[in-house]
């Protein structure tokens, strides 16, 4: 097994703390010349964080491709792949439905939009996303090189499955060519470790970039909405995932969350499930003991369609805006919000700012004011980081459940 750098968690947390500290000092100090401040912002925080994110994204496609191809080419039963696919999609959509239902319940009880008033300006331009039709069509790429270049993960997963199946059927004709993919997968896992070694510096730059740009006053806008959303995210990640893990696997919850802390910190700092794929795959395979046949499929798909954190935001934001506008949503409308959030979690999977796009769809459905999205965007930066941590934790939980159901999890490695 490839070893992770020692004291990684401590060093990442230290980098995060220093990022907040240095970023806050630079943001609130009045004696630093603007030229020096801009230089530090651009050539330290922006450049450092950009390099770190690019290095993570550099590994996504080859790591997913080689991991999935090597896993499928070694399968002895194609029925197993079908079972993994069905269980994965059902679990992801189910947890998304639970997530949005939870946020609607909390929002309707504690009423974050009651008596709220704000002068936050609406966004100049609302984001436009693609529909479910286009997303489904994109799963079947006409040019796989272009799909890889665009990081279209569902297309990459689909092609990898096809290639793995073809390799599986021709392995006896190619002198066990699949072994080469196994070795390449090992090489890319080592590359992940090399990139992870720079994580404390990368996290320092990412957090510093956020703080030096927006300061720490973000919670002043829509304070009750922010607090209730954070509570909903914590309840979902702690109780919902714990419940399904206990019901379907009976694995140690403490061990699961302890081993996922590095991934959650990575996701928080990057605000991107896709950029966290290399770290999530490494942790799920080497620390949680999930067989690569499962992890190499479940994790990339989860990074694309698992929108639990975003679903919680959509539910809470819908209730918040409705209450702020003096509109009472009916039980049937609440059910419609749940259905819309689940369906659009697939329809906008590959689109940046997917949460805002799907929120536009939901608000339009119920005639709620779109300009209120400006209030949501004003406080969304830090919340997006938290949502991503929730999403990757859900990806790992589903991977453990699917692997356990297929007898493809190493419990000794999990408990180590």
Image (tube, rainbow, N blue to C red):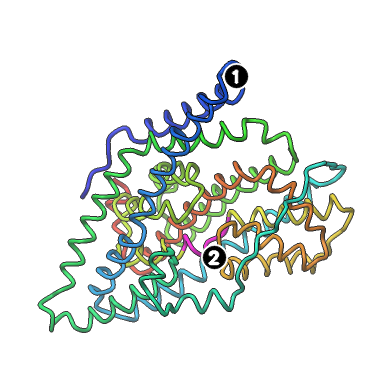
Q: Nearer the viewer, residue 270 or 315?
A: 270
Q: Residue at x 62, y 60 (%)?
A: 98
Left or right of 128, for residue 165:
left
Q: Position of residue 197 (x, y in %)?
A: 30, 39
Q: Is residue 90 magenta?
A: no
Q: Is residue 115 above or below residue 153?
A: above
Q: On the image, numbered disc 2 is attached to which residue?
A: 349
Residue 9 sits in quarter = top left
Left or right of 45, for residue 75:
left
Determine crowd level at label 2: few under 14, some 14-19, many 20+ residues with C-alpha closer than 10 A: many
Q: On the image, numbered disc 1 is attached to which residue?
A: 29
| Nearer-N-terminus badge (1/2) | 1
Q: Secondary structure at mark 1?
A: loop
Q: Secondary structure at mark 2?
A: loop
Q: Residue at x 47, y 45 (%)?
A: 270
Q: Position of residue 55 (x, y in %)?
A: 35, 48
Q: Is residue 75 above or below residue 13?
A: below
Picture disc at residue 188: none
Q: CA distance from mark 1 to mark 2?
A: 40 Å
Left or right of 264, for residue 365:
right
- Which mark is nearer the camera, 1 or 2? 1
Which residues lie in the magenta part? 302-308
């Amino acid at each position: 097994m490839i070893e992770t750098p020692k004291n990684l968690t401590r060093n990442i947390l230290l980098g995060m703390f220093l990022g907040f500290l240095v970023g806050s000092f630079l943001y609130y100090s009045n004696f630093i010349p603007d030229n020096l401040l801009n230089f530090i912002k651009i050539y330290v925080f922006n450049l450092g964080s950009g390099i770190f994110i690019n290095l993570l994204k550099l590994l996504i496609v080859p790591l997913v491709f080689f991991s999935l191809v090597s896993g499928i080419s070694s399968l002895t039963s194609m029925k197993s792949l079908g079972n993994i696919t069905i269980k994965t999609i059902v679990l992801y959509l189910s947890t998304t439905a639970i997530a949005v239902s939870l946020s609607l319940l909390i929002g309707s009880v504690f009423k974050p939009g009651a008596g709220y008033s704000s002068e936050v300006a609406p966004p100049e331009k609302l984001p436009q996303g693609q529909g479910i039709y286009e997303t489904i069509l994109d799963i079947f790429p006409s040019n796989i090189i272009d799909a890889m270049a665009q990081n279209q993960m569902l297309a990459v997963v689909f092609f990898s499955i096809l290639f793995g199946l073809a390799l599986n059927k021709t392995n006896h004709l190619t002198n066990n060519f699949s072994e080469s993919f196994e070795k390449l997968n090992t090489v890319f896992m080592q590359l992940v470790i090399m990139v992870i070694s720079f994580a404390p510096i990368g996290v320092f730059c990412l957090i510093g970039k956020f703080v030096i740009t927006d300061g720490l006053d973000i919670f002043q806008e829509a304070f009750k909405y922010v607090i209730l959303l954070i509570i909903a995210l914590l309840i979902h990640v702690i109780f919902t995932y714990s419940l399904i893990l206990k019901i379907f696997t009976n694995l140690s919850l403490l061990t699961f969350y302890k081993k996922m802390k590095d991934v959650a910190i990575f996701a928080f700092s990057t605000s991107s499930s896709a950029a966290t794929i290399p770290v999530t795959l490494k942790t799920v395979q080497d620390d949680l003991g999930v067989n690569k046949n499962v992890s190499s499929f479940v994790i990339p798909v989860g990074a694309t369609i698992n929108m639990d954190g975003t679903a919680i935001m959509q539910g809470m934001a819908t209730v918040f805006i409705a209450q702020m506008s003096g509109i009472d949503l009916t039980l049937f409308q609440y059910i419609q919000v749940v259905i819309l959030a689940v369906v659009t979690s697939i329809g906008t999977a590959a689109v940046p700012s997917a949460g805002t796009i799907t929120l536009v769809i939901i608000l339009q459905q119920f005639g709620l004011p779109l300009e209120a999205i400006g209030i949501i965007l004003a406080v969304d930066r830090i919340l997006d980081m938290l949502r991503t941590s929730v999403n990757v934790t859900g990806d790992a939980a589903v991977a453990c459940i699917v692997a356990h159901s297929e007898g493809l999890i190493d419990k000794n490695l999990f408990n180590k």
